[in-house]
Amino acid sequence: MINFGRTVNQVVIPEQSEQIILQTVAKAEQEFNEKQQAERMTALDFYFNVNMDKHIEQYFSSESLQQIPTYPQKVVPRFSRARMMLYKNAPKRIIGGEENSDYKDIAYMLDSQTKCFSELAWLLGSCHFKTKFNERKQRLEYEILPFVKEYYLSGESEPYGYSYEIDKGNNKDRQYVFWSEDREGMQGMHFKFNQKGNRYAVNGNEDMVNPYGINPISKVIYPSSSFDVVRSAIQIGIAMTEIALSVRSRLGQPVFTGIDEGQSVIKSGIDSAIILPEGATFQYVSPSGGINEMIESVKAFANQTAENNHLRIRWGESGGNSPSGEALRILEIENLESRESDIPYFKEWEHNRFEIDRTILEKHGVMTLSEDLSIDFGEVSYPMSVEEEIKILQWKLDNGIMTKRDLLLYYNPDMSDEELEMKLGEVQEEKQQERDAQQPPSQIERILNA
């Protein structure tokens, strides 16, 4: 991994002493880079489509926004989903040479959480992922942590500990959690603490030790963030609000000339006559500039951002026939190349995350998993015509790449083993009937039939 230098969320602990570690942790949580923190929070607002109005309102006067509401767009989640194709289809996790159904059942919502996590890691430039064990439901659960501080022992490149906020407490008594791993001569720690540095036990862990010995937090770090997508979304929101204001003011602003200010309050309407003094005029003045040109400017923002992130946008009014699957693959070639470059980041992360899962399950006496893990990320598929699909499936069957069982699961992945066996039996029975119908009857059969 390339080291681009430490960020504000990386804290160096001068020496391995419990008292010094505690002092460093308490002090670090009080100091943070407001600009970087605000930029990440803005990105999360636009990704989850919450609190978006406040990011647009600051660019308009209150008088303007009394006419119309702000008009932000859901640009960021669409860009994130389009760019992060690696988890579009759930990967196969091969443990000890085969898929482990028990692990899949106990890893609650792992596929949906990893999909969201990958999109946020690309958007924010880095993200953390926490594994925890639910004692009541006896399963692994996962939590995405966008804001985490890392603690390093002096001279080391791998984090010794992590802390993250769990309760803001109206900014008066903010609560945090700290984890650190076992090191030679010192057991890992786990506790809650507040802004004043006071420590509290978690779930009756009065010794405040890390029961797993390793940090239950894994991470992905990209070389850079994708905040240009967020800033483009802000620009588009501003522009769309301006367009809405322009539509609102298309009727125009009533303007009088040649009359005193006191006479300018005149009621108008199709059932009212306006009597003006000699030399006075009355007209509606509309804003200059066409709405179509403004809309094209908005498209330019979106198109440029898409190109910078190896994406393309197909607008609704583009017209024409839908491109074939092969044509789509050619159009998406840059994004497919980006997907390939994502694999090393997330393959390493998957192994780190699995090692955490394996350790936690062993510690709680649930199951023992093999250390051997391989990840098969699903291939990206594009829509095909019925004829193309049949040809490909037939070729796979003829060449032994696909079995009849695989073909049934291709069309219905949720089929149970019992349903599969029943369907395969029906297929075999129908084939036998076809063969019997094609064979000429013997002399004895002809006599009996006669």
Image: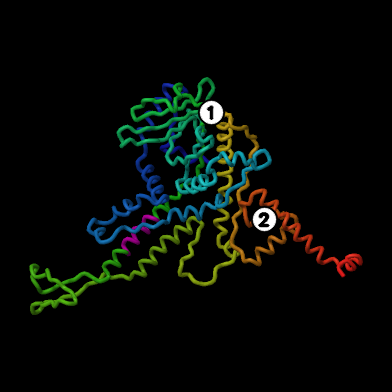
Residue type at mark 1 is: Tyr
Residue 118 on image: x %, y %: 51, 47
Magenta region includes residue 162: no
List x then y, in percent, for residue 125: 47, 45
Q: Quadrant of the C terminus?
A: bottom right
Q: Is residue 40 above or below residue 267?
A: above
Residue marked by disc 1: 212
Q: Residues within 10 Å of mark 2 (few under 14, many from 20)?
A: some
Depicted 214 relative to depicted 113: above or below: above
Judge from the rendering whether residue 371 lies leftward or rightward of residue 113; answer left or right: right
Can residue 350 be seen here? yes
Q: CA distance from mark 1 to mark 2?
A: 43 Å
Residue ID for mark 2:
408
Q: Position of residue 313 (x, y in %)?
A: 48, 62
What is the secondary structure assignment of the residue under circle 1?
loop
Which residue of the protein is positioned furthest toward the right in this rendering?
443
Left or right position of 277 against 124: left
* Dominant secondary-structure state across the stretch colored magenta: helix
| Residue 236 is a magenta residue | yes
How has the structure been colored for display?
Answer: rainbow
Q: What is the magenta range?
A: 233-243
Q: Position of residue 224 (x, y in %)?
A: 47, 46
In the picture, measured across the screen, residue 408 lies left or right of residue 20, that is right
Q: Nearer the viewer, residue 374 or 25?
A: 374
Q: Residue 284 lies in what quarter of the image?
A: bottom left
